[in-house]
Image: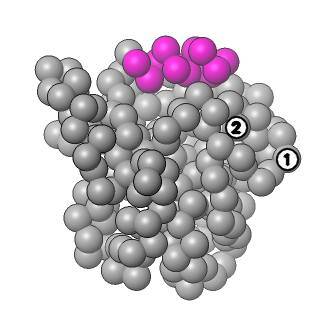
Amino acid sequence: MNAKERTKQHFNQTACDYNNSSDGKFVKPMYESLVNEIQKLPGGKLLDVGCGNGNLFKYLSGSEYELFGVDFSQNMIKEAENNCQENASFKVADAESLPFDSDMFDIIVCNASFHHYIHPDNVLREMHRVLRDGGKLLIGDPYIPTAVRPVMNVLTKFSDKGDYHFYGENEMKKLFKKIGFVPVSFEKTSPRTALHIAEK
């Protein structure tokens, strides 16, 4: 079973009680930084790639954004549909093949998901395709210190959660530039998390 299938299996199993899981507790502090960045834009269409149970959209309730979420886990999408019944649309989808028209979104969020992707170039190409010119991409992911990261990236082979690769600031910037994004900023949002921002 590769990392993609392990990811699907893990999140299908944890979906019904995600908020109380170790993953749910890890990701909770990341929402504030994301929401602060999102609210700098006046509105528009927002896509959450790897949306999980839709927690992010609860923080955007009553906003001017049209909200769309995709996740590889069918059970997570069921939870998201139950949790967010207003102004949000959800689909089961692979991040490498987003079921949307090109140039559709004003902002794309990917929170605590990017380190699961076994083909990050393909995911970023799809994000680039569906993001409009001038649109913003926000990637929140674990922060692993430079000295420890190589070891952690070896250990991901043994992860039962589908972890695949953890990225540092410079590595992420190189990926952005390779696909055609313009890196904007990097912020360490907590001792264990970071926010990478790019524009199309």
Label 1, label 2: how many angstroms apart (C-alpha)?
10 Å
Circle 1: is it few (<14), some (14-19), or many (20+) Cα within 10 Å? Answer: few
Residue 162 located left or right of residue 26? right
- Helix, strand or loop for the magenta stretch, by majority: helix
Task: Locate residue 165, reporting x and y percent.
Answer: 36, 35
Circle 2: is it few (<14), some (14-19), or many (20+) Cα within 10 Å? Answer: some
Number of the label disc, if any, that sits on residue 81 = none
Residue 66 located left or right of residue 84? right
In the rendered view of the protein, which quadrant contains the N terminus? bottom left
Of all residues, the one furthest to the front in this rendering is 1
In the rendered view of the protein, which quadrant contains the C terminus? top right
- Point out the tag, 1 or 2, that comes first from the N-terminus: 1
Viewer-nearest of labels 1 and 2?
2
Residue 181 is drawn in which quadrant?
Answer: top right
Front one among 54 and 155: 155
- Is residue 55 visible in the rendered image? The answer is no
Element type where label 1 sits in the image = loop
- Is residue 132 visible in the rendered image? The answer is yes
Of all residues, the one furthest to the right in this rendering is 101
The amino acid marked with disc number 2 is Glu
Label 1 sits on residue: 101
The amino acid marked with disc number 1 is Asp
Residue pictured at 31% horizontal, 65% vertical: 24
Label 2 sits on residue: 126
Front one among 158 and 63: 158
Asked if 21 appears above or below 34 in the picture, the reply is below
Q: Give the magenta-colored segment's residue range.
A: 171-183
Residue 169 located left or right of residue 21? right
Asked if 150 appears above or below 43 in the picture, the reply is above
Residue 12 is drawn in which quadrant?
Answer: bottom left
Residue 44 lies in magenta, yes or no?
no
